[in-house]
Image (cartoon, rainbow, N blue to C red):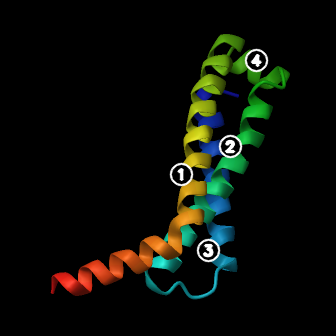
Amino acid sequence: MGPRAVLAVIGIGALAVIALWWHSTPDVRGLGGWLTGAGEVLGLLAGYGVVVLVALMARLPPLERGIGTDQLARWHAMGGRYIADHQNRAARLLMNDAPTANWWLKASAMAR
């Protein structure tokens, strides 16, 4: 399996995660709903990313032959930084969605 094929499979998996979230999400209303949804999606993608990182370092023979251990390790290191960022952003969005939404709505109403 070549690098492009592996990246395509990872990308398709991320799209599947988003599609499953979208399918199971009721109507999104208001800024708070959008912020909560964004936090949920980022959290789900971070969880999916952890599974991808484990697979990258699992020493699977097709991946090691097709891509190489050194490239897999670089992808793993880069992916770890993305996952940490996604987890951080998801936590911030989920913890602060309602107060931020209320503050933003009040501030925008006062500005009019």
Please, what secondary structure does the residue beneath circle 4 have? Answer: helix
Q: Reading the chain from its start, which is encountered first: label 4 or label 3? A: 3
Q: Amino acid at mark 3?
A: Trp
Give the quarter of the image for residue 4. Answer: top right
Which of the two residues, 25 or 67, is positioned nearer the viewer here? 25
C-alpha span from label 1 to label 4: 32 Å
Image quarter of the C terminus: bottom left
Pointer 3 residue = 22
In the rendered image, residue 54, in percent from the top left (x then y), is placed at 79, 33
Please identify, in this view, whether the residue under mark 4 or under mark 3 is nearer the observer.
3
Under circle 1, the secondary element is: helix
- Point out the frontmost of discs 1 and 4: 1
Q: Which residue is mark 1?
A: 89
Q: Which mark is residue 49?
A: 2
Q: Gap between marks 3 and 1, in whole Å? A: 19 Å
Q: Residue at x 69, y 14 (%)?
A: 68
Q: Residues within 10 Å of mark 2 (few under 14, many from 20)?
A: many
Q: Quadrant of residue 85?
A: top right
Circles 3 and 1, Cβ within 8 Å, touching? The answer is no
Distance of label 2 from label 4 (alpha carbons)? 19 Å
User: Label 3: few (<14), some or many (≥20) within 10 Å?
Assistant: few
Tell me which numbered mark, 2 or 4, is placed earlier along the sequence. 2
Q: Nearer the viewer, residue 91 or 26?
A: 91
